Image (cartoon, grey):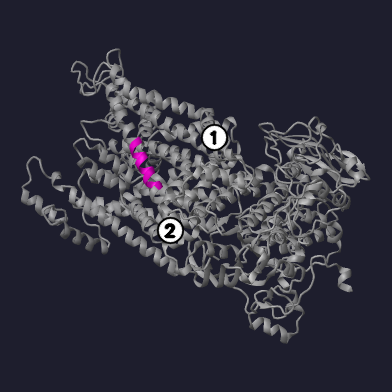
Amino acid sequence: MSILEVRDLTVTFPGGIQAVRGVDYAVSRGEVLGIVGESGSGKSVTSLAVMGLLPHNAKVSGSVKLHGRELLGMPESEQIKVRGKTISMIFQDPLSAFTPVYTIGDQIAEAVRVHQDVSKAQAAKQAVELLDLVGISNPDVRARSFPHEFSGGMRQRAMIAMAVANDPDLLICDEPTTALDVTIQAQVLEVLKTAQRETGAGIVMITHDLGVIAGMADRVLVMYAGKPVEQGPVDEVYYRPRMPYTMGLLASIPRIDGEEGPLVPIEGNPPSPAALPPGCPFAPRCPMRIDACHEEEPGLVTVGAGRQAACLRAHEIEHRGLTGADVYPVPVIPAAEVVRVPREQRPTVLELNDLVRHYPLMKGAVFKRRVGTVHAVDGISFDIAEGETLALVGESGCGKTTTLQQIMQLEAPQSGRIVVLGQDSAELGKAGRKALRRDLQIVFQDPMAALDPRMPVGDIVAEPLRAHGRKNVDAKVAELLTLVGLTPDSAERYPQQFSGGQRQRVGIARALALEPRLLVLDEPVSALDVSIQAGVINLLEELKNALGLSYLFVAHDLAVVRHLADRVAVMYLGRIAEIGTVREVYDHPAHPYTQALLSAIPLPDPETERNRKRILLEGDLPSPADPPSGCRFRTRCPKFARLGAAEQRRCVDEEPLVAQLANADDHGAACHYAEQIEVITASENQEEK
Amino acid sequence: MGKYLLRRLAINVILVAIAASLAYLLAASSLNPQVNFQGRNPPIPQATIDKTLDGYNMNPKTPLLERYTTWVGGVVRGDFGKTWEGDSVNEEMGRRIGVSLRLLLIGTVLGSGLGVLVGAFAAIRQYRPSDRMIGVGSFVIMAVPVFVMATILILAATRLNEATGSKLIEFVGEYSPGLTGWEQFTNRLVHLILPTISLCLGQIAFYSRIQRNMMLDVLGQDFVRTAMAKGLRRRTALFKHALRTALIPAATYFAFAFGTLLTGATFTEKIFSWHGMGAWLVDSIHQHDVNAVAAVSTFAAVCVLVAGFLSDLAVAALDPRVRVS
Amino acid sequence: MRNKVVLRRLIRNRNTRYGLVGVAVLLLLAYVGPLVAPYGWQEKDFTAFMEPPGPDHWWGTTQTGGDVFAGTLRGLQKSLVIGFLAALISTGLAALVGATAGYFGGWVDRVLMWGVDLLLVLPSFLIIAILSPRLQGGTWLLFVVLLALFGWMITSRVVRSMTLSLREREYVLAAKYMGVPGWKIILRHVLPNLSSLLIIDATLNVSGAIITETSLSFFGFGVQAPDVSLGTLIADGSGTSTVITYPWLFLFPAGVLVALVLSVNLIGDGLRDALDPGSNP
């Protein structure tokens, strides 16, 4: 018996925007249904429609039955008895999802009191118990904190506590871990699993992350342009997709256990919900399209036990056993010339030596005063050889962005040295700095924020050229736009008229305008959808090889790093924990932090996900204003916990430095007890062997 | 914390000192109190005028710097000198602050309170007829300057009095002389009606626009949706979560309004003949009353700074995000 | 593209249409009206004192036989010019100071913001009241400058805080990292992206300046005789006994003033809706 049955749900917004165009699904007790889709696929709108939380101007039709009772069109007085009681929802961004002026405890207690006839004191007590349930330490103290005093992971735990307060039958989770770092994501997913076990609720898990779904879901529903295009048991869909979109999606994801080399991109962009193409909305991007695809939109048809796909050629795909790699052309990227020279013989383009950057920590907006020092970057060293990509990875707060800003400012650091192309930043004059900027350029994370919305793309790309007094600007702009795969006539349009991937290409074109030698990439693909990401990653790889560039690539997504980088440096609390070639660090990580980081990343592979042994970290990142003594990682280190007291002493007293590992060429770790192990695919069984 | 407050206090004292000195120097150099005594019948001898003005430290024949030093010496001891008629500026100021308070307190509380309610209501009913009516109403009211509004009210009240053939609404001064006890009290209330309306209307219009915008900003936020997802009624979610949060920015305006309340009602005081602080500013300039001008200006500067401090405190009280733990 | 969208949203807004029509009608009245008016604003008709509106004197006459229609139009002209000029100057000043302080930060910021604080504390009413009657000789331009000088501080604070967040925007950082000098970044990236705020502010400053001007003139601290503004006209007509016996002296200039302020405010509000993508048209 299913708890929730959604039939032919459609949602239309004013202006004829069809956000959801006929969604069907059912969820049973204890079942986890995963809904995947890229931004704009209508997956979040679907769940808001189920909750009855869409704005008034949205038109909803179809049927949503909860335990056989129709929810659509129910009067508010009835709806409020269901919301938060039978169905609860967990939202994406837990900071904005809590009212800033009430304490966490009060907000959870409020949820209790809405549906249960208990006293205030009793509700407050329940709130504390709930916080305890989701693993918040000192719950009685923490209940009196305000949302802004919680870390992101703690807020999401509190959100889960609030959602399960009334023992719901169904939990809808809308991108519950998207805003979190991977190690925290692993913790929160664990809490969700616990909450499900405790309540026996059904879960609808909405996310764009195919890895998260693989580890959580029993069944999966893939959405594209407001409609489900494939649904079925998770193993079936992941291992034997029957719809080209699903196939492409699975093939385009960068994986930490994947091979290096080009990714499989899906060409084009998702259609705008206001202007859908006739026929199958995916047809314009589909490598398997035939004429019939443009004529009529295919409905979901059964293609096996308990699974459906919306593709005219689904049966053919099944018959021939096609996979994403078979139908999507894999681009060939020619290798670079420079890399033939051994690394030691290539010139160094960037060198950081013991770089330090501390900030004053201010507190209070009204009574502002300095209360401490943030050790944002606390002595890091690395170098980049010509033609090489070094990735700087770490979770938020590790200091990678500060490092990047220090490099880009080209000014004397507080302490240590920054040497760009042989020039020490501390010795640069004004003219020298400007001249050096030609060789050092940057591509930013958010392609919307990085382009001035009031300038046409042509002017944006021309800005660096004009700033350095170049001639023939227009011709050069056209050339650059072509180089990054845009048409020269794009120059006249504004950034808003481009999709995310195209905007990022504009950003790359601007960075290349002055023919730099070193390009700093600040999370260049993290704001893009998976299917778009692959194309941009390939472009970056291609440009590097063709133009002989060197990259400093700052990222939090270790899977992307594996595909793009040659070497990787893992940062933790302003220090480098581990550094080395990608192959060494990923396959044989030696620092406990790197090991936890790699093992926390969910793989888009249900089988492996189920059997994988995960190293879960305890707690949150300590404040960079008050880093632990000795090894900064020791407070969360699983290895530290297993050490004897004498060995632990060393971790507490002595800060470990990056030391080369004996059995590798280029691999160092800052751990007193470094020991290489395999974590990515390590399963429980393996461990026992 | 203590250090911070001290620093802030020091900066504010400097700012007030500069403002006060500038006001005094400007007034003392360009106003001429002699005109108050000249052209009288019988004429007052120049020597007497000089002597009187010397006594008040107001004689333009004394070098500016000397007068300024004398004035500063007094102010430091807390004495703002004498008015052109020889009364103590301090006493006059105390009296007038009382008048202004009696006039403005009700109006400001009523105006800001009603304004917030009207604005919140309009935001919840965005684009419905009631919202549009409130919008049009506040637009028209905000386009009417106080002195026009007050005059219109007087016109209307006179017509009303004529129509009813009685003195239903009185609008000159604080109260009619010759009454005592309960009668005086009700008479005072009657005198308050028109000035209070003229003060309130503008404030209601202003605050309702501000509060409506703040509310609309908050209404679309995720936490209102969360509150509804918990099972709260829309109305409860709006009042308990949205309005409470949207009050934070409005509070800065309130605090500011209360801080500057005492000098803000020049027109209302002048037109309805209340001898408060606002009216004094205009009167003292007209009367070339140098010390009074300087005193009112200093008082106004202090008010602005206190208001700024009040609005910071209000935000800290309402918003846990800026509170120091 | 964007401008077209804004324009469309602006025209679609009913309030804005009323506002635009209102301002157009008042402009026409102020500058074409005197050409068709039977009397000049300085002309005195000694056969008609305190005459109510009639076929000869459309809006009646004053106690000295001046024509209220002609006088009001003259006052309207003055108020319009003073309002628009003062608004332009004060918004420009606010934009420049706010953006400079916000972008460069450090001591530049501290000095400029200290200046702003000082100007806020200074008794602006007193300064204008004392100085403007002494600025006689047709130099009402100085009066405009005085009005503008005390009207930009709050906006400049807003501009500054918005610049602080714009400064961290990636396109500004990108320009900085490619070696574009600070003043150019302010002109090319910061101010254009604040244009919505500035346009709205300038519009609302027009009505603000008009109200301040008329208020000061009402007390005799603004525009000086023999010249007139709406404020001086209203002051002449608004003594308690005058307004009851000769209401036209008050009602016509007051009506014109309210219409002017209302129209300008309506345009400002429409602009806010049109330029702010978050709001519905």
Single out the residue that lies furthest toward the bottom. A646
**Do tags 2 and 1 sit on the same chain?**
yes
The reply, left or right, for residue B66 in relation to residue A85 is left
Q: Is residue A565 magenta?
A: no
Label the magenta part by its dominant secondary structure: helix
Above or below: residue A194 compared with residue A96? below
Residue A205 visible in the shown view:
no
Query: Residue at point 64% right, 43% down?
Result: A499
- Label 1, on which residue? C1
Where, quadrant-wise, is the C terminus of chain C in this rendering?
top right
Where, quadrant-wise, is the N terminus of chain C in this rendering?
top right
- Label 2, on which residue? C105
Q: Nearer the viewer, mark 2 or mark 1?
A: 1
Of all chains, the one bearing label 1 is: C
Q: Quadrant of residue B184?
A: top left
Amino acid type, residue under disc 1 in the picture:
Met
Sequence-wise, the earlier of marks 2 and 1 is 1
Q: Nearer the viewer, residue B145 or A688?
A: A688
| Range of residues picked out in magenta | C84-95
Q: Nearer the viewer, residue A123 or C68?
A: C68
The reply, left or right, for residue A300 in relation to residue A73 is right
Q: Nearer the viewer, residue C120 or A84?
A: C120
Residue B14 picture location, percent across and down: 32, 61
